[in-house]
Structures are given as C-alpha cells and as structure tokens.
Amino acid sequence: MPERTLILLRHAKSDWAGGQADVDRPLAKRGVRQAPLTGAWLSHSGYRIDLAVVSPAERARATWDLVAAEFESTPPIRVDHAVHATSAGELQSIVRALPGTAHTVVLVGHNPGLEDLATALAGTTVSLPTSAFAVIGWEGPWSSAGESPAALLAQGRPPRVNAPPR
C-alpha cells in the first residue's frame, strides 16, 4: 500500500427535474441505486478511509451517505464548501492541506475539477462519470500531491472497475 491514498469520488447521478439551485439538487433514482454499489466495491476492496472531505451540495452529501453505509464503521466526514464547483488547482490545495494523520482520504465532489485533478495526479487521462471513482496512491505527505510520482490504482464505476489484483 502506498503511504497516501486519495479516492476521488464523483457524486452519483443527480435529478434535474425539480429546478432547484445547483447546491440543492438531489440524487436521481439511478444515483440512489449506483452509489451503494460504489461503496460496496470500496469497502470490499479493503480501503480503510480515515477521512471523507465532501462538497456541501446535496447530491454529493447524499452520495457519501450511501457509500459510507456500505462500510463496517462510518468514516469521519468534513463538509468543505471549497470542494463545490472548484478547479483542479483548488482541489489540489485542499489535498495538500489534509492532516498527516490521515492515510486514506476520499474527496467527494464534481466535474470537471475531479477529473482534471485525477488526470494531473495520475499522469494519464481519467474519466469520472457519475458514481465513478479514481484511487491514486503515492509515497510522501499530502503536501507533495502533484509533485511526487503517483499511481492510478483503480478507476471506474461498479460493476466495471479497472484495478490491479490485490
């Protein structure tokens, strides 16, 4: 296992039918079905999440609630307004400021920022449709995110996840 593992998780499919403000948009039925599958994959893959940093958007918080419910014990959560509708550079600043005591962190947010961050960290194009994730690992502290060589350990959305055998 790498010293640091960052799981970038895009929120599940949202419902555009209600005309709510962006931050208040709920999950669609498809999102409610997909998010637990992502949580089950992450949980069964052995990732022990030390912290979840989640966008305040309703769809991101609901996604995390459904994902976290699949873990034996619920990881701690920090809702961070800076995660909503932000760039890869701003997300990288959030990652670089993560506490050193956390070794595996999930960042639940939005595109295009998450895809751009995943691509920048992994050095390869990473696609994150709704409910998809990218697991990126590297040696070194959080503050070295984007400076230390990183590896794309897994990516996708269940049932199709590209991951090396453990």
Image (cartoon, rainbow, N blue to C red):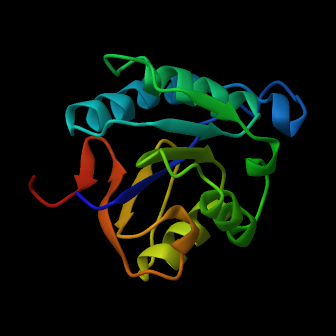
Whether residue 75 sits left or right of residue 59 in the image: it is left
Q: Judge left or right: residue 163 versus residue 139.
A: left
Q: Please identify the quadrant where the N terminus is shown.
A: bottom left
Number of marks present in the image shown: 0
Please say whether residue 12 is visible from this viewpoint: no
Residue 160 seen in the figure? yes
Residue projecting furthest to the left: 165
* Residue in the image at 49% along x and 74% along y: 121
Residue 65 in the image, given as x and y percentages of width and height? 54, 21
Q: Is residue 3 above or below residue 75?
A: below
Counting from the top left corner in percent of width and height, residue 66 is at 49, 21
Q: Give 59 or 101, whichever is nearer the viewer.
A: 101
Task: Identify which residue, 18 or 113, lies in the foreground.
Answer: 113
Residue positioned 42% across, 17% down in the render: 69
Q: Is residue 117 above or below residue 29?
A: below
Using the image, determine if residue 21 lies above or below residue 82.
Answer: above
Look at 54% across and 29% down and name the residue there: 64
Q: Is residue 57 left or right of residue 140?
A: right
When asked about the image quadrant of residue 4, the answer is bottom left
Residue 28: x and y in percent read 61, 26
Residue at the front extreme of this rendering: 101
